[in-house]
Amino acid sequence: MEHVRKLEVQASHEEQLYHILDIYLKLFPTRNAFLFRYSPLGYLGEGIIQLTSTQLIHIREIRDDIRALPIIHSAIKEREAKYCSGIEHLKQISSRYVFPSNIDSMLVVPICFGTVVVGYICSTEFQEGVVFDEKTLSSLSLYGKLVGKYLHSSIENDTPTSLSKRELEVMKRISQGESTKEMADSMNISELTVKQYVKTAIKKLGANNRSHAVGELFRTGILS
């Protein structure tokens, strides 16, 4: 709790994300950390940053359907930290995933608030001789929940301008899989107007794209 409270003094959202991983590396026997955003729309995991003791790397090019990665899917579904290694790791990880082939173990820590998962942390390098027993995994799960609670509180205290009725309707239709043309036809407006509603909604929510915006609406309970 003391470590998580330190996030409150960070000046920007980007610094908060960095310190989430920095604190994680200091508290737990890991040597790297990949931070991902998670959207229930399409089971999409999107990379944000990677942190080691020597470098910070942006990994925004990484986008993956976590259903192809059983250990991540399981951690998110159960909202508990998961670890696998050796043969079990080979069974759990898709060969097309981003980590190098010489990696033979993985730790996944979901970041969640209540029943809603907003992201997760992955680690693939660990301190020598470390054993991830039930107690350690429980502590990792607690860290993910404390971070999720903090992020939820932070966003509530800095809520963006409310979406208009039309903007919310468009975002709800996106979450249901409708295309721009389908929305325009059913709402009796032009496709250009639909795109404008989407653009302003994304901006108000402080999101990067449609999936991120819909994920934020699910996470905050506006959509369910």
Image (spheres, rainbow, N blue to C red):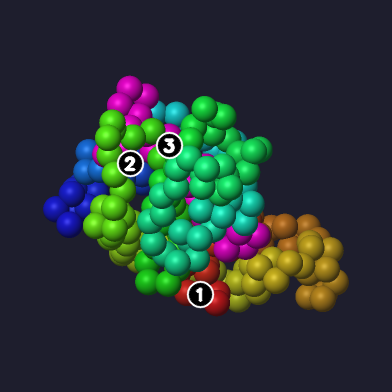
- Mark 1 touches mark 3? (CB < 8 Å): no
**Splitting the image into 4 quarters, where does residue 150 fall?**
bottom left
Q: Which residues are magenta?
A: 29-55
Which residue corresponds to the image point at 39% horizontal and 62% vertical from the top-left? Answer: 80
Using residue 56 as the reference point, say whether residue 135 is left or right of it.
left
Query: Residue 21 got which mark?
Result: 2
Where disc 3 sits, the SS reads loop
Residue 35 on the magenta segment: yes
* Residue farthest toward the left in the current orientation of the protein: 2
Where disc 1 sits, the SS reads loop
| Three-letter code for the amino acid on which mark 2 is drawn | Leu
Residue 222 location (% of width, % of height): 51, 74
> Which circle, 1 or 2, is nearer the viewer?
2
Residue 204 on the magenta segment: no
Q: Is residue 206 above or below residue 122?
A: below
Q: Say which label, 3 or 2, has the lower sequence index.
A: 2
Main SS, magenta region, reads: strand
| Three-letter code for the amino acid on which mark 1 is drawn | Ile
Residue 107 location (% of width, % of height): 41, 46
**Splitting the image into 4 quarters, where does residue 166 fall?**
bottom right
